[in-house]
Structure formats: structure tokens, C-alpha cells
Amino acid sequence: MEINETTVTKKPTIANLVSGNVYVAGYKRGDRNFTDLNRFVGYKVGEQVFSNLKQLKGHFGVTNLKELEFEADRLELGSITAEFYCTEEQYFWGAYLYAGAFRVGTSADRLTLAAA
């Protein structure tokens, strides 16, 4: 699979991720760093995919992540995930919205983002 990558140099946040751009993403625990290069695919709710957080929040008529999480739960839509594609090892993974932040893995480590 060929990937068109745009490398990001400014400090990324969950609010300014752009679908198709490459970021250093993952999580950190203590002094261990579990991050690598990932292409951001978009935000997914059920079968719907949104290219940015503003579009996703607008769709649900909310202004913050806690409200977004509440609405998805109220409507029984399942998890909201930030979807990534690991460009080095070539697999898809997602960070899920939980307790007002995007988390990774069963330990619910907070998603870490950095410029590529």
C-alpha cells in the first residue's frame, strides 16, 4: 500500500489533527516511550468517519470532549476513536475517548502526540 504522507512540524493536539498527516503518536508510561510514526485517518463513530474534531463535535452539536462522549453514550453509538495507521509496521489502531480524553490500550494511557 502506498501512503501519501505529509509530515507535521508544529505541536499537534487532539483538536488540530488533520486527516492524512503523519504524527508521532502512541503513549508513554514512566520512562518508557511507546510512540512511532502514524498517519491520522480520522475520528470514527460507528461507521461514520470525520476528518477533524471540529466536524465531529459539530455533527453532535457539542463543544467539548466530555459532551461528545456523553452524546455517543446516550445515543448508544459505541466508542469514539481517533484512528491511526502505523506507517512503519503497517497496521491500523485507534485511541478511544474515555473520561474526557483519548486513551490507548487496556490501561487507558493518555494518547501522546508530537510533531513527526
Image (cartoon, rainbow, N blue to C red):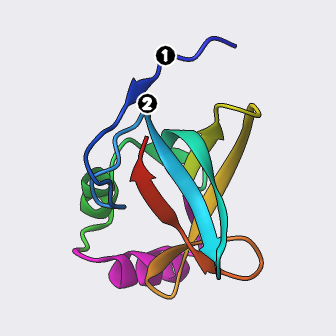
The three-letter code of the residue at mark 1 reads: Asn
The front one of 60 and 1 is 1
View extreme (top): residue:
2
Q: What residue appears at the point 26 percent right and 73 percent down from the top-left corner?
A: 62
- Residue annotated with mark 1: 4
Tell me the distance, in whole angstroms, between the alpha carbons under discs 1 and 2.
8 Å
Looking at the rendering, in which quadrant would you find the C terminus? top left
Residue 95 versus residue 18 in the image, above or below: below
Query: Does dot 2 land on a helix, a strand or a loop?
Result: loop
View extreme (bottom): residue:
99
Task: Say if mark 1 contacts mark 2, CB within 8 Å.
Answer: yes
The three-letter code of the residue at mark 2 reads: Gly
Q: Position of residue 33 (x, y in %)?
A: 64, 64
Magenta run includes residue 111: no
The front one of 73 and 35 is 35
View extreme (front): residue:
31
- Residue annotated with mark 2: 20
Magenta run includes residue 64: yes
Tell me the magenta residue range. Answer: 63-81
Query: Does dot 1 land on a helix, a strand or a loop?
Result: loop
> Mark 1 Cα within 10 Å, few/some/many (few <14, many 20+)?
few
